[in-house]
Image (spheres, helix red, strand yellow):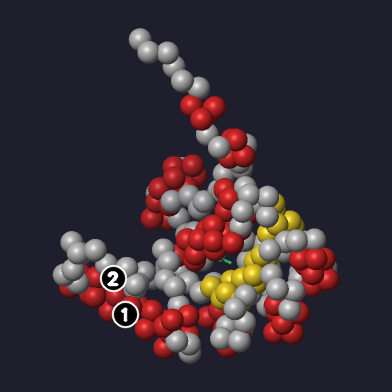
Amino acid sequence: MTKPTDIRKLMRPHLLDMQPYEGVEPPEVLAQRAGIPADRIVKLNANENPYGPSPKVADALAHYTAYPIYPDPEQRRVREAIAEYADTTPDRVVAGVGSDELIDLLMRLFLEPGDGVVQCTPTFGMYASFAQVCGAKLISVPRDELFDIDVAGIREAANQGAKMVFIPSPNNPTGNLVSEADVHELLDTGMVVVVDEAYYEFAGSTVASLVSAYSNLVVLRTFS
Ligand SMILES: Cc1ncc(COP(=O)(O)O)c(C=O)c1O
């Protein structure tokens, strides 16, 4: 018998105590827990479309023939279509596997271990999870009593060296929008400002038009 290895000793130490992100359980698991059939479960907490995709999407997927071919590494056609939808140019668009992947890539692009990244709590949980994976310093700047962001608090964090801030607009879970004036103030600090517009289609308010003017602004959208 070979000696058992304490595999945890080989892991990156800062990940050993990481709080796992609690994803949304599938209907079968919830059904089993509640002791009812899965078809009686209605999940309202993951912002899922209960009607499924458009029949046009199902048809396009069923008739697509290039599945065995690696996709275009430069995502040309989808970036062109997204650019048209978002009123921008394809060179300013990156497509990811959900915006979660883009949040992860942005942190890996900008954050060294120990670098500061700001979230405005209460907010979407993935920023904290990915920051922990990077070994970044997560700075939580609480929102005010109306759940609006504390611009002065974020600027203070930037003065102390924080490199990035993530602001969902509308915010998950409070629905607050960020004003363009506040975004300008944050951009002027020079930090990377990520405005996560995952819920843009519910609110119609966007700062996407500022992207061409500021190299430190990133706007995220999602098909979810
Ligand atoms: C604010 C916000 N951003 C991003 C995401 C993740 O989106 P996606 O499904 O595209 O990874 C969510 C999902 O809950 C979200 O609430």
Q: Can residue 94 be seen in this view?
A: yes
At label 1, counting other C-alpha atoms closer than 10 Å, the crowd grade (few under 14, some 14-19, many 20 or more) is few
Q: Is residue 7 left or right of residue 127?
A: left
- At x 74%, y 84%, the residue is 181
Q: Can residue 54 be seen in this view?
A: no
Q: Is residue 149 left or right of residue 95?
A: right
Of the residues under marks 2 and 1, which one precedes in the sequence? 2
Q: Is residue 141 or residue 217 the one in the foreground?
A: 217
Q: Is residue 175 left or right of residue 146?
A: left
Check disc 2 and report the residue beneath it. Answer: 72
- At x 57%, y 74%, the residue is 218
Q: Where is residue 105 in the image (x, y as percent from the top left)?
A: 50, 61
Answer with the quarter of the image where residue 57 lies.
bottom left
Q: Where is residue 31 in the image (x, y as percent from the top left)?
A: 44, 47
What is the quadrant of the C terminus in the image?
Answer: bottom left
Q: Position of residue 199 (x, y in %)?
A: 56, 74
Check disc 1 and report the residue beneath it. Answer: 77
Q: In this view, does 5 lie above or below 45?
A: above
